[in-house]
Image (tube, grey):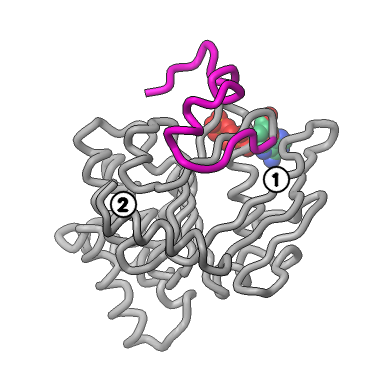
Amino acid sequence: MTDAAEHQAIGAARAAPILSARNLGKSFGALRAMSEVTLDLAPGEAVGIVGPNGAGKSTLLAALAGSFLPSEGTITFDGRDITRAGAAEVCHLGIAKTHQIPKPFDGLTVFENVRVAAAFGGGGDHAADEVAYDALKLCRMLPLANQRAERLGLLDRKRLEVARALATGPRVILLDEVGGGLTDAEAEELVEIIRAIRARGTAIIWIEHIVHVLLQVAERLICMDAGRVIADGDPEAVMKDPQVMEAYLGHSVE
Ligand SMILES: Nc1ncnc2c1ncn2[C@@H]1O[C@H](COP(=O)(O)OP(=O)(O)OP(=O)(O)O)[C@@H](O)[C@H]1O
């Protein structure tokens, strides 16, 4: 890590959290998907989440985004209890999430897709146009602005998913496996975009299986297993943690 990045990381760690979860739990019927998850995210901080399949990572992100009510625990955003706020209110407040499987509006162009998100995020027609343009520029999608969303390849669908989240004007962006299924070169492109989002001061929580890709952005790593956080901190220390290594037995950690 460079001195500047280290400085930024230390500063972020000391700041009052923008997003906090306390003892979050979620059951789906008899299935316990998440238990006693507690975490803090500082403004501008970038945190990676790893863990084996079924560890509860997407469940945590969905709870933070207001996609469903947690079975237990509380979520606080910028000092305000948002535990019972729905996804629309959470998004308006400033938390945006990308979906593991991109969900663009087919039949609309790339620009129209992002403009819908910008209009939802607030502001009038003119502001929505500018915000959509800005999000597409950052995501390097301006040349595709007039392309129909359903004609996009995987990388472009992922970039569109990020652009739509960005256009809502988030202070926290939650990324659920945006790198999944991409080639190394495509993942590098995505990393550049996510770094640019981070450089604007947006805090990030990013779930990704490919750790070396994740660590190009995240300065802190959380590992989940069986619905619980089993390690949280410096990425190198987390990956060497005996519990984390045990959780990954039989899985590849790249
Ligand atoms: N809507 C749901 N209804 C029932 N069970 C669910 C639901 N969502 C998730 N689960 C279950 O909760 C557990 C945790 O799933 P989750 O998707 O959060 O794990 P994950 O760590 O994100 O896994 P992956 O890396 O495979 O995406 C799994 O057993 C999953 O089948």
Seen at 22% across and 45% down, the residue is 189
The residue to which callout 2 is attached is 159
Seen at 78% across and 34% down, the residue is 32
Sequence-first tag of 2 and 1:
1
**Mark 2 surroundings: few (<14), some (14-19) or many (≥20) residues within 10 A:** many
Up-down relation of residue 241 to residue 177 (above or below)? above
Magenta segment: 228-254
Give the Cα distance between marks 2 and 1: 29 Å
Is any part of residue 109 visible from this angle?
no
Q: 52 or 11, which lies in front?
A: 11
Seen at 64% across and 43% down, the residue is 59
The answer to whether 129 appears left or right of 28 in the picture is: left
Name the secondary structure under disc 2. Answer: helix
The answer to whether 122 appears left or right of 159 in the picture is: right
Up-down relation of residue 137 to residue 205 (above or below)? below
In the rendering, at what x and y percent does residue 76 appear? 67, 66
Q: Nearer the viewer, mark 2 or mark 1?
A: 1
Magenta residue check for 200: no
| Type of the residue with mark 1 | Val
Q: Residue furthest left?
A: 143
Q: Quadrant of residue 145?
A: bottom left
Magenta residue check for 237: yes
In the rendering, at what x and y percent does residue 246 appear? 59, 17
The residue to which callout 1 is attached is 37
Q: Residue furthest top?
A: 250
Q: Quadrant of residue 128?
A: bottom left
Is any part of residue 24 visible from this angle?
yes
The answer to whether 240 appears left or right of 110 in the picture is: right
Seen at 49% across and 51% down, the residue is 205
Quarter of the C terminus within the rendering: top left
